[in-house]
Amino acid sequence: MAYSGDKIGRGGAVPHSREVIQVKDLVKNYGDFQAVKGISFTVKRGEIFGLIGPNGAGKTTTIRILSTLLKVSGGSVNIYGNDVATEPEKIRHIISYLPEDAGAYKNLTGREYLKFMASFFDGGEEMVDKGMEIADLGDRIDDKVDAYSKGMKRRLLVGRAMMIDPKVAILDEPTSGLDVINAQEVRHIIKDYARAGTTVLLSSHNMLEVDFLCDRIALIDDGRIVEEGTPSTLKERYKANNIEEVFTRVVK
Amino acid sequence: MSLKSIIKKEVKELLTPEAIVPVMVIAIVFAAMGNFMGGIEDELEEKPLIALINLDAGEHGRLVSTILEENADIIYNGTDVDEAIKIVKEEGGSAILEVPGDFSTNIENNVTGTINIVWIMKGVGVMDSIPSAKIDNLIQSINLGISAELIQRENDLDPVHVLYPTGREETILFKDREIEGVSPGTLSGMLSAQSVMVPIVTMILIMMAGGIIISSMGMEKEDKTLETLLTLPVKRESIVTGKVVGAAVIGLIMAGIYMLGFGYYMRSFRVGEVNLAERGLALGMLDYALVGLSLFGALLAGLALSLVLGTYAEDYKSAQSYLFPVTALALIPMFVFMFMDLGSMPVALRGAMLAIPFSHPIIAMRSLMFDDYLLVIGGIIYTFVFSGVMIFFAVRIFNSDRLITGRMTKKDGLLEKLTK
């Protein structure tokens, strides 16, 4: 059962208009160390917004704050009108977070894992079917997760993240561990969801992926946003052929 | 050089606080046990503190006084039993020995000379019967002395009577209860046989369920499932409760299976049923319900404590070392209560035992035999309060950054250190 894209809940293209993610002067301290030093950005509904930057720049910290995993040290984050500091539980109902190195419960089968995850969203068979369609694991969906390859596990997790029709999908390296064909398919799934109204906040080290997927990009370095714009604007601004060149020039 | 590098790396990797602390604790426990055993030897060498009521002015009665004066510290020597009991209780003595007025006459007439013993017991642990063992020796000496005297002179007495001229009638005073016809050794033996299951069930239950919950936290971190779980629309309280209840169910099943086997094992050692009901020491339905509730409270406390410790685990391997404090806390009361009773412990040890929630089911079993409901209900309340505090900490940790970052900073206070 390969992914067909016809089961995305909100259906049809939606115009980018309303800002549904507002990050203002966000600061995150770990004791004396400041990982995020006052970053601000907004993301509109249905937009795919990419956070890129070198290792240790503060991307994952920012993503974890938006996913309600870490507390805010300063500034504010608002998602669909809910403050991440005071209303994290409301936010958890509308987001779906896919961590970079996430795993699944080894003793469950793929199908059981999706059912377990769907139960938190009161999702029935339809939600699980959608997850299985995205995961596209065929008969292996009834095998224990422990027996899956890295790529199969990632597809299952992408299926889990997208099956709930999240209003906001926060994806850290969504295609990590996937081969070219599978990675491409996952990118198409993400695009389809965005078209249907899901707002996507994405972090990736794969600049081709960022170029292909993102409507806008913010480049983070040393806890600060140092560049922001659409891929084409940035390429033009730095007279670069691709985002990788932009990245290299900005960070160097 | 490369060998040196490998050895250096191995030592650095293996020499972690998680590996060292349990070994150090075990060393300290052994040292403390050595000290304790030394203490028992010292105690055995000390003369017993007793009261003597000698109503017999005859030859044998005088011999009893002489032997006791030489081998015991007599803290009361008179005729008033109530006064003697009062003084022995105040001075921390062990027994009141009463020699009846017809002691010598009876012996001379082929009748066993009875010595009445009133034992004052502060506890019913194995250690609490040590003073009675010393007095048993004194009675043996008295028997031997009288026997030797009877043999020295010519008489027409029954040879068996000459060898065993004295007998005894015993009463134990413990927690305002009078238990007749039982020696302290027999009583502590009877109670140990009756209550041996509770400490073992407690220990197995806590170790099993604690291990499950700590491992579960370690696995969540190792398998990288925790981050996803924490972004799901489920209250942190539900995650904590789910983990505690899940581990409790599995722990109960596992302990049940273990106990089934252990029950059969124990049955093979039972020679004759001890009749506690005859002594007014049997437990009723309400008592068993209270022991069950106490056990449940201890299990809950163990699980909540394990969950808090489990949040510090980085992975499955380190989770095992965080189980050590729980195991130690489950084992210590089991061993201590094997030897001693709450009433006869030094104050500091008593405080420590009462502070460990896993002591309370053990205390409950013994206390209920003597209708000490206040201690049992207090213990149950304590275990639930302890669980509540631990669950509060666990929820705070689940609501904090620490579960994700594992960071603690120097500036933080204790509460922040625990929950940040």
Image (cartoon, rainbow, N blue to C red):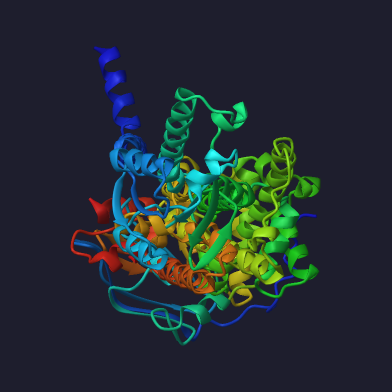
Vertical relation: B234 (above or below) A160: below
x, y percent for residue A72: 33, 73
Left or right of B18, for residue B363: right
Q: Could you say which is closer to the camera, residue A174 or residue B375?
A: B375
At 59% from the left and 31% from the top, the residue drawn is B157
Count of marks, rendered view: 0
x, y percent for residue B58: 41, 45
Vertical relation: A140 (above or below) B390: above
Q: Could you say which is closer to the camera, residue B280 or residue B309?
A: B280
Q: Could you say which is closer to the camera, residue B279 or residue B5?
A: B279
One can see residue B420 in this view: yes
At 61% from the left and 44% from the top, the residue drawn is A151
At 60% from the left and 81% from the top, the residue drawn is A14
Q: Could you say which is closer to the camera, residue B266 or residue B138?
A: B138
x, y percent for residue B411: 18, 63
Indicate the quadrant containing the N terminus of chain A: top left, top right, bottom left or bottom right.
Answer: bottom right
x, y percent for residue A60: 39, 59
Vertical relation: B103 (above or below) B165: below
Vertical relation: B213 (above or below) B26: below
At 76% from the left and 55% from the top, the residue drawn is A2
One can see residue A63 in this view: no
